[in-house]
Amino acid sequence: MKPYPLILLVTLVAFGACKSRKAITTTRDTTKLVTKDTTSQRRDQGHPAKYIEHARLDLKDEAITLTSRRGEDDGKVDDQAQLLTSDNYFVHIDKKSGKADTLEANLDNLYTDCDCIIRDVTDSFRLPFLTVQVVTPSEDIYYTNSFVAYENGHFKKLFTIELDAREKGVELHRVGSQLTGLMTGRDEVVDNLEQDYPVTVDTKTFEVTNGKPEKQYIGWRTTATQSFRAHRVKNGQVDSSLVSVKVGAEVLVDTFYRSLGKVRLLLSDTLMVEIKAETAEMKLGHNGAG
């Protein structure tokens, strides 16, 4: 954590600000909080710098923003960082003193028209200090969930959860000494995007632990890329009889039993079969789109 002298008109950074979600941020305070920063006068390759506020959370006595520094040429903001090095920061503002503390966010894919979320999660996390979740676009279909906190005069990063595909962010809830929730991930059988991967965070160390469900419903339709034979499933039990599945046959990937290394498929409304996970991985079409 560094208190930077940022020349940031924190309440008036209106140039090209990112679309905020009204349900997340509150009405802006009219208090003019100006923090001075020598880097605002900095010019790279002869171009001035602009500060873009992507998201803002206003509270009674403090505010937190996600803000980027961009180059400007002829009144146009450089989203591709060609004019100068692009930086982005989490900024904590003390409205009474006008002091701003900043943290380097080190986020990619923050463009002028990006859609970011910032929310106060202090109560749901049951923590004794202000804790904020910031959801930002990442590569492809994914989003980054950054969690920052302000405690006893110190602004700090708590933890980060990456590669989740939900634009509203990961939902975490306090259970004992942990924060728990579910995030997205791709199964190792057909690479389908699932929403049931457990994630836990230790509230003492803020270490993030990712897991995999033992029994995972997939529910994705695909085709056989190679012929194979599968054991019939009757009344929930695997039968000794075998069913032939030909190349091009349509199947529904039903359930992946991860600890057993087995996958159940629906060949029709009434015909269920079971195969090894390795067979499914090799001989069924994979989902590359998400």
Image: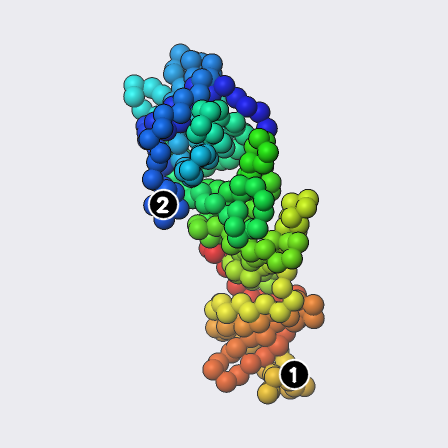
Could you say where residue 48 lies in the image, as x and y percent from the top left?
A: 38, 16
Q: Residue 21 bears which disc, if any?
A: 2
Measured as percent of width and height from the top left, residue 75 is found at 29, 21
Residue for badge 1: 238
In the image shown, does 241 or 234 lie closer to the viewer?
234
Q: Amino acid at mark 1?
A: Val
Q: Amino acid at mark 2?
A: Arg
Is residue 8 placed above or below 63 in the rendered structure? above
Q: Nearer the viewer, residue 215 or 172?
A: 172
| SS at badge 2 | loop
Residue ID at (44%, 34%): 61
Q: Left or right? Give the position of 279 relative to 26.
A: right
Q: Are marks 2 and 1 in contact (CB under 8 Å)?
A: no
Instruction: Specify how the rendered protein is coloured.
Output: rainbow
Q: Residue furthest left?
A: 75
Residue 67 drawn above or below residue 39: below
Q: In what quadrant of the picture does the N terminus appear?
A: top right
Q: Which mark is residue 137?
A: none
Side (left or right) of 155 relative to 118: right
Q: Position of residue 231 (x, y in %)?
A: 63, 81
Q: Is residue 80 visible?
A: no
- The picture quadrant where one finds residue 95 is top left
- Write the residue at 66% across / 50% down: 202
Residue 264 visible in rendering: yes
266 with respect to 25 (left or right): right
Choose mark 2 or mark 1, whichever is in front: 2
Image x and y of residue 236, in percent: 61, 84
